[in-house]
Amino acid sequence: MTVGGRRSSAGANLSARAHRLEEERTPSLRIIFEPRPPWVERVEKAVTQPRSNPAAPLNEWVETDSRWFKPQIQNTRPVKTARQVRVYLTNVEMMKNGKYEEVGFGTSQLLRWSNQKGGEFDPKDISHLARFQVDVLSVDAEHQRIFVKWRPPEWQVNEKLFDAPSQDRKTAE
């Protein structure tokens, strides 16, 4: 507000408050994914249970090449840290006749943070410009199937969703 050619403190306070309200309504996190590195990572000699014996003990697991799909979570607010962030797979859609259709995904599933030693499913505080990725899918030469990376014991091949080749779209929140 301008009074006599000078901006009043009430007007400045109102403007600052409006800016804060706008910032509070703006989503602070965004999910970034492109079909190339670092979002798609090839891992040579990944260790996995053998296809012939999924219950094999760890010392009988096999090495195989795999490809991992890892969206990045970014905090878009430069002055605020996003607190207690977790990422969930909330929906899966498949392309049918040129349109995406829901496939009856069911309950949201907590995804794990990439490249963590312990605390893979714990909430994270994400400051501006920090880079965190979540593991969503992997495929490997041993199983030739899609593995969805949600919390065990649900971390498994979801054959009902991914048993046929398709173009699909996943939603994470």
Image (cartoon, rainbow, N blue to C red):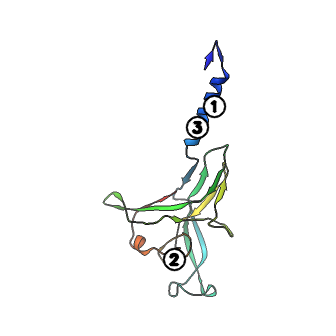
Q: Position of residue 104 (x, y in %)?
A: 39, 66
Dot 3: few (<14), some (14–19), or many (≥20) neighbours within 10 Å?
few
Please tell me which residue lies in front, 48 or 11: 11
Mark number for residue 16? 1
Name the mark on residue 169.
none
Whole-percent x, y for residue 88 in the image: 53, 61
Residue at which label 2 appears = 141
Image quarter of residue 158? bottom left
**Location of mark 3 (residue):** 21
Label 1 Cα crowd, 10 Å radius (few <14 / some 14-19 / many 20+): few
Q: Residue at x 48, y 75 (%)?
A: 157
The residue shown at (60%, 70%) is 43
Q: CA distance from mark 2 to mark 1?
A: 56 Å
Secondary structure beneath dot 1 equals helix
Under mark 1, the amino acid is: Ala
Query: Mark 3 near mark 1, Cβ–Cβ under 8 Å?
Result: no
Q: Which is in the foreground here, disc 2 or disc 3?
A: 3
